[in-house]
Image (cartoon, grey):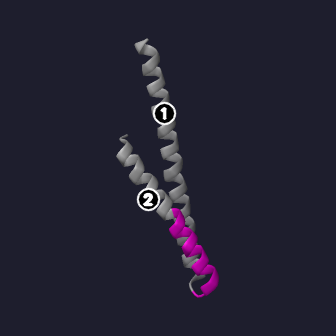
Amino acid sequence: MKSTTQRILATVGLVLIFTSIVLMLVSFFTGAAAALLSNISLFTFIGAVAVLLFLSYKRKQMAAEAQDDAKNEE
């Protein structure tokens, strides 16, 4: 995966996390549509965390591949 794609996905993940936190706060203080906003923000948060965990996994995988390539060149 290219580093530009990783940066974009990481940015999207962080934006989703902040959006979910804002939605949680709004749903906490309004109370009118609290259940719907709370569910939306919860799933948004879970999705964002999943994206960031995937990026972390890919970054570790790419680092391991680079290390293997360096060992093979020696």
Nearer-N-terminus badge (2/1): 2
State whether residue 40 is above or below residue 5. Answer: below
**Horizontal side, residue 64 vs residue 8: left or right:** right
Q: Residues within 10 Å of mark 1 (few under 14, many from 20)?
A: few
Cα separation, mark 2 vs mark 1, equals: 21 Å
Instruction: Identify residue for label 2.
Output: 12
Q: Nearer the viewer, residue 42 or 62?
A: 62
Say whether residue 22 is magenta.
Answer: yes
Query: What number of labels is visible?
Result: 2
| SS type, badge 2 | helix
Q: Which residues, given as a range, are shown in magenta? A: 17-32
Instruction: Identify residue for label 1.
Output: 61
Locate the C terminus and report the quarter of the image it occupies. Answer: top left
Locate the N terminus and report the quarter of the image it occupies. Answer: top left
Q: Residue at x 35, y 41 (%)?
A: 2
| SS type, badge 1 | helix
Asked whether residue 31 appears in the rendered view, the answer is no
Q: Nearer the viewer, residue 50 or 1?
A: 1
- Identify the amino acid type marked 2: Val
- Identify the amino acid type marked 1: Gln
Asked whether residue 56 appears in the rendered view, the answer is yes
Say whether residue 9 is magenta.
Answer: no
State whether residue 23 is above or below residue 47. Answer: below
